[in-house]
Amino acid sequence: MFYIFYQIAWEGRAHAKRLGSDVYKVYLSCGVLTLVIWLCYPVAWGVCEGANIISPDAEAIFYGILDLIAKPGFSILFVIGHWNLDPGRLGLKIRDVDQDPALFSEGKLTPGEKMSMTSRMRNGGYRNGVNGVNGTNGVDGVHGVNGVDGVDGVSHNTGVDGRV
């Protein structure tokens, strides 16, 4: 528990500060809420089961309130805090469902990725069994890498999985 507190309070804060004041503010608010709520759980145990100070009904209410703040409360704070942050500043690449994942990869595309991307674009995107892996135009399909119309432009007799 102390290691997690250290990571949230010191290491994480230092990284968030480098990303800008708005990221730091969101991180600080979410981190402080997490640390305070997590510290309340042992206190709740201490006054409930440990010292037997409060009744079982009050204990259930105490834990219920902590759970509501820790789970939905944190989630709402997290979403509201990140609402106006650019995901690219956090090192995230977010794409729409209809965008090709190969366009978001680092570096150059392999010949198989180029062929697969071209096939998907020509045939209207991903479809189960048509343009994906093991489909007609995918990596193991008829027109994919090692398929009938392979990357090298030469017709091959069979695909990787043995289909013609």
Image (spheres, rainbow, N blue to C red):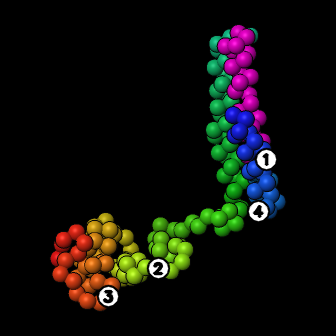
* In front of the other: 84 or 8: 8
Q: Residue at x 65, y 65 (%)?
A: 91
Disc 4 or 3, which lies upstream in sequence?
A: 4
- Which comes before the other along the chain, label 2 or label 4? 4
Q: CA distance from mark 2 to mark 4?
A: 30 Å
Query: Secondary structure of the magenta portion, mostly?
Result: helix
Residue 52 pos. (x, y %)? 71, 9
Residue wearing tag 2? 109
Report whether 99 appears left or right of 131: right
On residue 98, the disc is none
Determine which residue is flagged by label 4. Answer: 19
> Is label 2 in a helix, a strand or a loop?
loop
Residue bounds of the magenta highlight: 30-52
CA gap, disc 3 to disc 1?
Answer: 54 Å
Labels 1 and 4 touching (C-beta < 8 A): no
Dot 1 crowding, Cα within 10 Å, few <14, some 14–19, many 20+? few
Q: Amino acid at mark 3?
A: Asp
Secondary structure of the residue carrying numbered label 1: helix
Asked which secondary structure carries label 3, the reply is loop
> Which label sits on residue 152?
3
In primary-sequence order, the first of circles 1 and 4 is: 1
Q: Is residue 49 visible?
A: yes
